[in-house]
Amino acid sequence: MRSPGRVLLVLLTALPASILPVSSCAPTGEQQIHQWIAGGDFARAQSAIEEILRQDTVLAPSQRLLWEFEIERMNRIRLDFRQTEREVKEYVGARLPSLTPEDYARFEASHALEAMTIDGQKLYFNSAARNLFRLDPHARQVWQEQHKDAPAPTGLASESGLDAHIALVMEAAVKSGKPYVKPVRLRVKQSITVDGGEVPEGETIRCWLPYPREIAGRQGGIRVLSTDPPRSIIADNSAFLQRTIYFEKPSAGNAKTTFSIEYEYTANGVYLPVDPGRVTVPRVTPELAPFIREEPPHIVFTPELKKLSKEIVGEESNPVLVARKLFAWVDTSITWASAREYSTVPNLGLYAYENRHGDCGMQTLLIVTLCRLNGIPARWQSGWEFRPPGQSMHDWAMIYFEPYGWVPMDVTYGMRETADESMRYFYVNGMDSYRLIFNDAFSQPFYPAKVFPRSETVDLQRGEVEWRGGNIYFDRWHWNLVWEEKHE
């Protein structure tokens, strides 16, 4: 029997945002509500939903949860779109002073400047102004020129440093004949701090922090050094693909309430020298079948993605060469940019295609969808990337080549700038050593089950908190992660 938390998670992640219940007592139809939402008439849509919730006394609990989350989703969109036109034009105009109203209209039409009208007010995505200098070619050139004297990245944070590390991973794997090489020992401390005044004093706060997965050869040797509070529950590694450590602690009232964990683990680089001549179309076994089919709402074989796939792949049928074509297209056609909270986007992969930009998770879900469209098993993986001295939350993929098995793929890191074809496509079948893996799937249940909808309904990198009064969203708490490499 599934827990209520699991049922809720399935409801909130298995359906596109456009599919919501319709009640016979509802004062307005589902279609009308969605027209209002699509048009940014959030206040009217919320009022109609609240009327449904008041009037329909026989509404199924699952339907009620979906309606309630639609209100929550609109509130989250409001938090993501808080920049006014004046604020955006001040930021952009300070760097591109000669822009005309026509230029701004062009930016918005090309999705380089993301805006929407909410309840009659035109508002911009919080990162829209900065994203413009990533997405528009001319604006990007201007930004690069204005920041040409900024300190250059060092270590693996630089592209040359990363490429040097990749070369060592490839060399070690080929020389040893083993795919897992160049291990590093990392120490991580991660925490969540709930703001004072958010939860009444003495009320129990429930907290889930992400916990490293044990993956044979890839990641292991996990050793917990300390936790706050001391008592915890660690989710089973095989049963929960988004692995957590769970805590409970009474609220400190007007003071902050903090949860933390410190641990060490060992991560390995990965490289399999895949020979396209040896690779065959995989037999669809029960184990592989889930990874070549649709997985709504974020992996859907829409007409436009089917058309795109045919245009990219052409007559090619070799799985490795098909994967490389798809990888190259996403790398060169979908620009990385800061993204909205995932719970506000109905289909993350399709969003990346329609807007021609997205962050790592959006890029990953798009290439996973395209791989599956071509019969190539592919799935999600995510956690953190450490590029000494830097760090970031990050999402990537796993892809299956027969007879090699599962190999990591990171389209956000893209093709390397080199004449060596194996190294150029390293991130189609390889991975650097500096990863922290929490998730082997997206939108999976927690243990113990979460009662209320998650702040992040897709990924798990920062953690989650709630109390009996409801979920505690990102704007009401703070997270932190620090790490260091341990040298023997």
Image (spheres, rainbow, N blue to C red):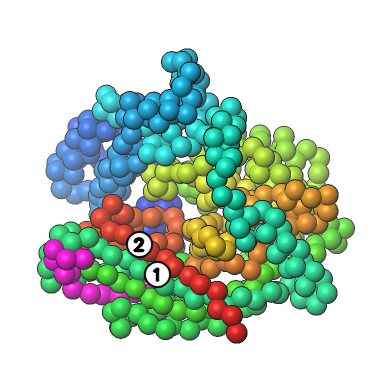
Q: Which residues are magenta?
A: 243-256
Name the residue at 44% across, 62% down: 461
Q: Is 100 inside the magenta-drawn segment?
A: no
Q: Nearer the viewer, residue 184 or 380?
A: 184
According to the image, label 2 marks what residue? 479
* Residue type (three-letter) at the residue carrying disc 1: Gln
Q: CA distance from mark 1 to mark 2?
A: 7 Å
Q: Where does residue 198 sit, x and y in percent of width and height?
A: 18, 59
* Quadrant, the N terminus: bottom left
Task: Say whether residue 35 is visible.
Answer: no
Q: Nearer the viewer, residue 298 or 333?
A: 333
- Is residue 151 at all visible to an observer of this figure? yes
Quarter of the image where the C terminus is located: bottom right
Left/right placement of residue 342 relative to residue 155 reads left
Q: Which residue is mark 1?
A: 190
In the displayed structure, does residue 73 sit left or right of residue 440? left
Dot 1 alpha-carbon crowd within 10 angstroms: few under 14, some 14 to 19, many 20 or more: many
Is label 2 in a helix, a strand or a loop? strand
Counting residues from the N terminus, which is met first, the one under dot 1 or under dot 2? 1
